[in-house]
Image (cartoon, helix red, strand yellow):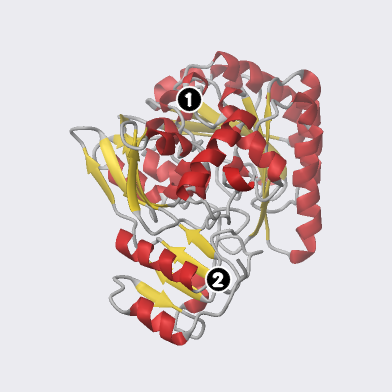
Amino acid sequence: MAAHEASGAAVDGLRAGFAGEVITPGDPGYDEHRGVFNAMIDRRPAVIAGCATAEDVGRAIRFGREQGLEIAVRGGGHGVAGTAVNDGGLVVDLRRMNAATVDAGSRTVRVGGGATMGDLDRAAAAHGLATTGGRVSTTGVGGYTLGGGSGWLERKYGLTCDNLLEVELVTAAGEAVRASGTERPELFWALHGGGGNFGVATSFTLRLHELPAFSFGLLVWRPEAGPEVMRAYRDFMTAAPDEAGGGLLYLTGPAEEFVPAHLVGRLVVACLVTYVGPVAEAREVMAPMLRLGHEGELITDMPYAEFQCLLDDPPGYRNYWSAEYLAELPDPAVDTFCRCAGDMVVPSPSQHLLLPQGGAVARGAADHPVPWRSAPWAVHPLGLWEDPADDERARRWARGLRDAVRPWSSGTVYLNFIGDEGGDRVVAGVGADNHRRLAAVKAEYDPDNVFRRNHNIRPARAA
């Protein structure tokens, strides 16, 4: 449906009895409410429905459809393609619905659809509990979980969707429904990686795990050490216990005490080892990496909720990301990964990432629409930069790295790590057989493809 301007009388009708706030152009705070974290996105919706309840969400959806407005759904607003906001349409904004309520006895948490990982992490930490969360605290729980959910704790506790117990959502008809293992099980299955295609998720219930200690080590070398360090890291992680996670990355050397002055502001290679356990154990596990002659070192324990904030994406940066999931990591792939690092924009907060999987990720439910869980490695160019003049260079680096490692690809991809890369990539993200099954679920809950500003799966009858 095309975008249209909503009538003033219709907007007034939506405002009447709305528990949240309805914002239109010219209202105070409009520009603040329409902004998302990616500074490349500058869109102007006709109406922003800041929902406070599931009832608000239902009313907003019905309003948008009656007015012929394209509907976007905003949770954390962290999707790199900026699909949480549109031009001339309706944004269903869930940020007021951000409560995280822990039941320590059952080790579960009920999280609002507009909560961020920071909201969840802090609530769980108060009880010595945690679940796999995004790698930064500003990630929205909703889109992250519905896409599968990959994070630092995944090798120990599985993907976030592996810990999903129940979802409450509002369908394209404005109807509130619940999905779990026993209630609407086919919809529940679809919510384990099928994204926001089936409705607006207003709450999630997740399993929590005891996390008595968390620690990490970050080691830094000159970039020319990259191939040697990466080969060692590959062998280290292949044998590492499930408690160990992290990644190998090229980045701009930060101005921190543990980084030598001659490496600050220039390209460096780093190894991050996260560990579910005390720092003494982490040092023992990291021993193979500590023998490689690193030049900078930070090894410490830290509350997990605090660690989640360390790598938060700084606001105001332009963003472009991509990813490729690898079935193997032979020496030629290592050399290719390291060579491409020289194309990254430096200095900038960009990261040229290799992430290990395995552990509980690989052991999770094989039938969930997250086929990338079986890949042992993920390559993830995460581009952040300030100057628009660097736009083409940054995109070229990200695409170049993705394409360069494709000879070793598993053919799958985590959709939360990429923007709009076309329908074939959506199929790669969920699997061809799963895609057909998801299209049937879509036809039941959103037959008109109202929720299409996402990694879209069209309803079966239109596929």
Distance in Å between CA atoms under marks 1 and 2: 40 Å
Q: Looking at the image, tell me whether mark 1 or mark 2 is earlier in sequence order.
A: 2
- Looking at the picture, which amino acid does disc 1 mark? Arg
Q: Which residue is drawn at 51% across and 79% down?
A: 6
Q: Residue furthest top?
A: 239
In the picture of the structure, the residue carrying the numbered disc 1 is 155
Q: Name the residue under label 2.
A: 89
Q: Where is residue 133 in the image (x, y as percent from the top left)?
A: 44, 40
- Which element is circle 2 on? loop
Viewer-closest of 207 and 250? 207
Query: Can see residue 220?
Result: no
Q: What element carries label 1?
A: helix
Q: Nearer the viewer, residue 60 or 254?
A: 60
Could you tell whether 238 is left or right of 33 in the image?
right
Q: Where is residue 359 in the image (x, y as percent from the top left)?
A: 50, 20
Q: Single out the mark in the foreground, 1 or 2.
A: 2
User: Which residue sits at x=47%, y=69%?
Assistant: 64
Residue at 68% over, 62% down? 386
The spot of residue 111 in percent (x, y) is 32, 48
